Image: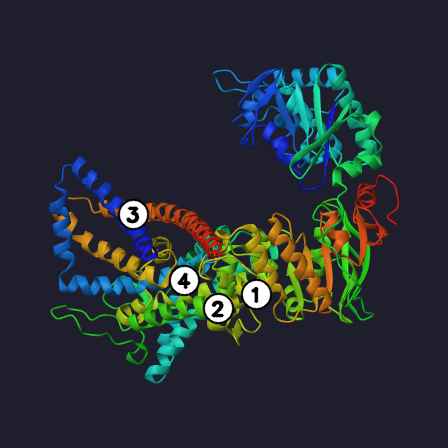
């Protein structure tokens, strides 16, 4: 029971605190907070907004899991952003140029994306293992390199062509055989829910299963809990860095898939960027847990969608960014407090229980 | 000049840290110049004129001597500009007054160990301290440097300063100290004058002369070699040799004890056997098979059980549950794994067995490891490492920091392991334990075996002097 309460206490406290800060800022800037929240809620619960929220959170979920895999063993893959963009570009290019039967076509595109993402993340792993370069530094820098490569390749005589009727350029559109059809489940919405939501669900379940049921997952968690004990237990730290980085990069490769195979069918200049960084925030918000991240990404997406209404009412929509930032920060602090409380509480409990048992034994003796 | 001597873990460093304000005493008082004081932090202590030079130097390598000395106490005016000239003058004054010469503008990374120690001492004097605490100052020095250090300390003494120093090396203590306090098991045994005692008597006082309790009866040693280390040499990151041509053989049913003052290569020897360190020369054999190039995991799978020296850093996932800790180190073995998957049911059931068999006092196997006492954590580790039919058991300080009850149980388990025909490598700072459990004892000093001892005849005093290099053969 206490376990359950504690698990919920931290995120709820943190969100409450974020809401409080936002309210104070709204009041200070002369806006009625309740009215603003009501507007956001009304807009956010429109059918179209709901579809958008679910679709956005599908992408966010994949991004956060890609980050969380590394975070679980204190490996900070800050380069998810560059990895997914590079992966999406190559996957879009290959997808537009091959002709394959429907299922296979999608499979090939996903595979290309995962491989490209893994290779790009693997560069950081090799640098860390061979040269001792911090993965934080190398992955951040690789983001810039990725941006450069994409700018170079996304040119008319290379990967891209001019999109008719616009100044935009993009890869050759992926034919229907390589697209993932959506689900029209929300009545009154103008667009469907991404079929890739199934992909996100599979990734989430796979992540949970890997962490809790496999030897690899055990090694990963052990490396995160205590690198020294992990090494002494026979876990090869360098090999773990390589595998986890490759896995994180491969998952990062999936981030662009919902958009690519569900909406745009091409990688163009408008392809969303910065999702990797959103993923970092959501992984922190969801404490790297496959279930926590579901709530984190839904909340984040809902806020991102519902903030659109604010400009109309003259409220700066950056207010939501403040709220998101405060939420992440306070979640991190709240979890640390709860974690410490939990450890001391358990130590106390065990002590008390053993003392009681000893007394009982004495009384019966 | 007052010397504090005692075995590892006797409480010397803890006492000194208390004097330096790093720990608060639960009971008792500290008096400085006849005045009772409460020291809340090192800066409190420095304010009262008490300074400490730690065993591991606390210097910034990429700063100059001058910068290191003033670090944290920079002479600066309101403008925040450091008056380097003034600082340099004072350092030179101190150097001249106490004959502690160092170049204030040399980078710390470029100077030797002896010079670094002088910098540490100047640092303390610069802050105006009148009482100096030195934690094992000679442990890192070569003989000539030791002489220099002692003449510098004598100079300090002649100018009216008080020096307290900790040491294991009894001959040193006897030659320079004016008074010696012996500490054992956290309490003062006695305070003696060096003219009244011999090195042997001092060693006796250090280890106590109670009879060894952890006795092993008749020999179970066979002629079947299980673990063999041949000519192993290892150097550390700084390029210093920490193991020098080490060879040992342990047979089935034999306990080989390694005696030595901490930091003489025991930890490195264990790590080399476990595959956590790669020696640059020599080989390791397990049951006749060369395993020098094997990974730690393969070695564990091949039947080496490992009770690490520092259980909270190397033996346990403190925030993991007991059954997760049962898996640690045996991730690939039954009953913890089925192929590439973790067998939760098997691991949990086996954890229940260990908890019952090894008397781990816990309300359940779902509590986290850090909720247990040190003794119960250690019993869990022993139970884990004895599972899965090991052939060799490496036990590094198996009873360190555990209560008396758990200690007796762990001794029993080591005896049982020996009776079952395991080869046991036992490292311990507890000489009674070492003598009581071992079939053979080797003494490690500065990375080399310097003596062999027969546990049936050797006394803790003799071992103690062999360990400290104070002369006197083991047997």
Mark 3 chain: A
Q: Is residue A131 visible?
A: yes
Percent coordinates x, y for residue B76 in the rendering = 53, 18
Describe the element under mark 1 as helix, strand or loop: helix
Residue ID for mark 3: A14
Of tags 2 and 4, the one toward the viewer is 2
Could you tell me how far apart the alpha carbons at marks 3 and 4 are, in whole angstroms? 24 Å
The chain identifier of the residue carrying mark 4 reads A
Dot 3: element: helix
Q: CA distance from mark 1 to mark 2?
A: 14 Å
* Position in image of residue B374 (x %, y %): 56, 50
Residue at which label 2 appears: B348
Which residue is at the front of the view, B125 or A339? A339
Residue A66: which disc? 4
Q: Residues within 10 Å of mark 2 (few under 14, many from 20)?
A: many
> Would residue B241 appear left or right of A46 to someone viewing this image?
right
Q: Earlier in the sequence, mark 3 or mark 4?
A: 3
Q: Report the chain holding disc 1.
A: B
Count the marks: how many?
4
**Proximity of marks 3 and 4: CB atoms separated by less than 8 Å:** no
Chain ID at mark 2: B
Residue at mark 1 to residue at mark 4: CA–CA distance = 43 Å
Placement of B463 over or under A81, stated as above or below: above
Determine which quarter of the picture holds residue B53. Answer: top right
Rounded to the nearest angstrom, the CA distance separating label 2 from label 3 is 35 Å
Q: Percent from the top left, x then y, of residue B360?
A: 54, 59
| Quadrant showing the N terminus of chain B | top right
Q: Which residue is disc 1 drawn over?
A: B357
């Amino acid at each position: 029971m206490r376990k359950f309460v504690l698990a919920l206490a931290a995120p709820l406290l943190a969100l409450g605190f974020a809401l409080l800060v936002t309210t104070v800022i709204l009041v200070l800037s002369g806006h009625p907070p309740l009215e603003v929240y009501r507007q956001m809620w009304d807009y956010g619960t429109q059918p179209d907004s709901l579809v958008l929220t679910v679709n956005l959170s599908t992408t966010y979920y994949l991004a956060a899991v890609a980050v969380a895999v590394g975070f679980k063993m204190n490996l900070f893959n800050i380069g998810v952003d560059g990895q997914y963009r590079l992966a999406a570009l190559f996957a879009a290019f290959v997808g537009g140029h091959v002709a394959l039967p429907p299922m296979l076509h999608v499979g090939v595109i996903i595979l290309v994306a995962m491989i490209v993402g893994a290779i790009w993340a693997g560069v950081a792993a090799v640098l860390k293992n061979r040269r001792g370069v911090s993965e934080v530094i190398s992955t951040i820098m690789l983001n810039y390199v990725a941006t450069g490569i994409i700018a170079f390749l996304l040119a008319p005589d290379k990967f891209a062509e001019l999109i008719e009727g616009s100044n935009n350029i993009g890869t050759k559109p992926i034919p229907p055989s390589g697209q993932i059809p959506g689900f029209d489940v929300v009545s009154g919405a103008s667009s469907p829910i991404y079929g890739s939501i199934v992909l996100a669900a599979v990734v989430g379940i796979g992540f949970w299963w890997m962490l809790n049921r496999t030897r690899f997952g055990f090694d990963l968690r052990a490396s995160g809990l205590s690198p020294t004990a992990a090494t002494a237990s026979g876990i090869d730290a360098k090999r773990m860095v390589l595998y986890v980085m490759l896995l994180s990069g491969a998952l990062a490769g999936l981030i662009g898939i919902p958009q690519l195979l569900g909406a745009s069918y091409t990688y163009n200049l408008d392809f969303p960027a910065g999702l990797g960084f959103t993923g970092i925030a959501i992984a922190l918000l969801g404490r790297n847990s496959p279930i926590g991240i579901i709530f984190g990404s839904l909340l984040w997406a809902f806020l991102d969608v519902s903030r659109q209404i604010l400009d109309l009412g003259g409220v700066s929509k950056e207010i939501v960014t403040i709220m998101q930032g405060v939420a992440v920060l306070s979640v991190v602090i709240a979890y640390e407090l709860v974690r410490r409380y939990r450890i001391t509480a358990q130590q106390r409990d065990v002590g008390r229980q053993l003392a009681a048992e000893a007394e009982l034994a004495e009384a019966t003796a | 000049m007052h010397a504090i001597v005692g075995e590892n873990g006797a409480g010397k460093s803890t006492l000194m840290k208390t004097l330096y304000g790093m720990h608060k005493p639960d009971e008792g008082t500290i008096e400085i110049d006849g005045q009772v004081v409460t020291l809340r932090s090192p800066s409190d202590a420095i304010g009262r004129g008490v300074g400490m030079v730690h065993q591991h130097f606390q210097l910034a390598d990429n700063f100059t001597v001058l910068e290191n000395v003033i670090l944290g106490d920079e002479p600066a005016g309101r403008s925040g500009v450091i008056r380097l000239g003034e600082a340099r003058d004072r350092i030179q004054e101190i150097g001249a007054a106490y004959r502690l010469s160092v170049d204030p503008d040399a980078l710390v990374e470029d100077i030797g160990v002896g010079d670094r120690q002088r910098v540490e001492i100047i640092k303390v004097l610069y802050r105006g301290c009148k009482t100096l605490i030195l934690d094992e100052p000679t442990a890192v020095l070569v003989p000539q440097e030791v002489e220099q250090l002692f003449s510098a300390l004598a100079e300090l003494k002649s100018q009216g300063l008080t020096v307290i120093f900790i040491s294991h090396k009894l001959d040193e203590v006897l030659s320079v100290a004016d008074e010696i306090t012996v500490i054992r098991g956290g309490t003062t045994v006695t305070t003696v004058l060096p003219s009244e005692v011999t090195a042997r008597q001092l060693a006796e006082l250090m280890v106590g002369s109670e009879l060894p309790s952890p006795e092993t009866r008749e020999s179970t040693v066979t002629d079947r070699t299980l673990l063999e280390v041949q000519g192993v040499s290892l150097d550390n990151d700084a390029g210093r040799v920490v193991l020098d041509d080490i060879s040992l053989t342990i047979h089935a049913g034999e306990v080989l004890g390694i005696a030595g003052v901490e930091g003489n290569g025991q930890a490195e020897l264990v790590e080399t056997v476990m595959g956590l360190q790669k020696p640059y020369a020599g080989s390791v054999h397990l049951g006749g098979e060369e395993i020098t190039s094997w990974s730690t995991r393969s070695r564990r799978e091949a039947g080496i059980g490992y009770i690490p020296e520092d259980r909270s850093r190397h033996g346990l996932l403190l925030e993991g549950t007991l059954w997760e800790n049962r898996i640690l180190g045996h991730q690939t073995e039954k009953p913890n794994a089925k192929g590439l998957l973790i067998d939760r049911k098997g691991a949990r059931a086996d954890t229940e067995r260990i908890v019952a068999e090894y008397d781990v006092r816990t309300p359940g196997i779902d509590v986290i490891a850090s909720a247990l006492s040190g003794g119960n954590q250690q019993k869990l580790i022993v139970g884990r490492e004895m599972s899965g039919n090991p052939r060799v058991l490496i036990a590094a300080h198996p009873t360190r920091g555990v209560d008396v009850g758990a200690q007796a149980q762990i001794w029993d388990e080591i005896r049982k392991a020996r009776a079952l025909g395991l080869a046991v490598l036992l490292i311990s700072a507890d000489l009674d334990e070492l003598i009581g459990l071992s079939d053979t004892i080797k003494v490690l000093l500065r990375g080399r075996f310097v003596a062999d001892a027969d546990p049936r005849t050797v006394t803790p005093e003799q071992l103690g002097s062999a360990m400290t290099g104070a002369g006197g053969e083991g047997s």
